[in-house]
């Protein structure tokens, strides 16, 4: 089972990947990052994407009512933000403790395959070992 670094290296190998990170959406901190960062700064990107992830994860109108009180897992599996030249794919990671992390993949819109990236990121999230 891959850890953070191995998972991020696998993510950056996807066709069209510009950068990848693992972010804690409660603190807004990047737990690991590889490749280029949107805007050139992974810490700023982590903080900004964490705001989006936290808002969606806590929004009761999405999915099955936001975060379930008993297991603290977001009902939403992933988010896709589309820009003129890229996709930002955020995949929530289920963990045995608090499930407050997500994988962020920055994917070139011309060279990347969004469907493939979504499938592979889901597989990485399932296999990721934290700790």
Image (cartoon, rainbow, N blue to C red):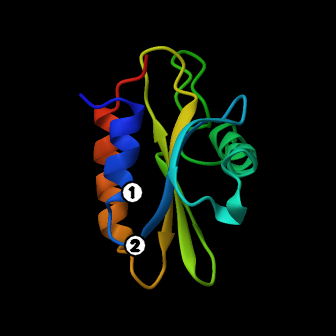
The residue positioned 35% from the left and 62% from the top of the image is: 117
Regarding residue 85, the answer to whether it shows in the image is yes
> Where 119 falls versus 103 (above or below)?
below
Q: Quadrant of residue 93?
A: top left
> Where 61 falls versus 101 (above or below)?
below
Give how far apart the Cα atoms at labels 1 and 2 are.
8 Å
Which image quarter is the C terminus in? Answer: top left
Is the residue under label 2 in contact with that under label 1 (CB below 8 Å)?
Answer: no
Q: Position of residue 18 (x, y in %)?
A: 49, 66
Residues 58 and 98: in front is 98
Judged left or right of residue 51, residue 130 is left
Residues 115 and 3: in front is 3
Regarding residue 75, the answer to whether it shows in the image is no
The residue positioned 40% from the left and 36% from the top of the image is: 5
What mark, if any, has residue 12 been given in the picture?
1
Residue annotated with mark 2: 16
Crowdedness near tag 2: few (<14), some (14–19) or many (≥20) residues, C-alpha within 10 Å: some
> Where 100 falls versus 85 (above or below)?
above
Which image quarter is the N terminus in? Answer: top left
The residue positioned 54% from the left and 15% from the top of the image is: 70
The residue positioned 69% from the left and 43% from the top of the image is: 50
Crowdedness near tag 1: few (<14), some (14–19) or many (≥20) residues, C-alpha within 10 Å: many
Circle 1 — which element? helix
Q: Position of residue 11 (x, y in %)?
A: 36, 53
Circle 2 — which element? loop
């Amino acid at each position: 089972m891959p850890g953070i670094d191995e998972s991020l290296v696998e993510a950056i190998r996807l066709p069209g990947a510009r950068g990848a990170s693992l972010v804690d959406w409660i603190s807004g901190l990047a737990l690991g990052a590889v490749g280029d960062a949107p805007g050139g700064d992974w810490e700023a990107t982590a903080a900004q994407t964490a705001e989006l992830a936290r808002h969606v994860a806590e929004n009761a109108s999405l999915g099955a009512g936001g975060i379930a009180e008993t297991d603290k897992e977001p009902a939403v599996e992933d988010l896709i933000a589309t820009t003129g030249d890229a996709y930002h794919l955020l995949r929530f990671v289920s963990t045995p403790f608090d499930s407050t992390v997500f994988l962020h993949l920055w994917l070139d819109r011309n060279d990347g395959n969004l469907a493939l990236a979504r499938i592979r990121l889901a597989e990485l999230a399932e296999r990721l070992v934290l700790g």
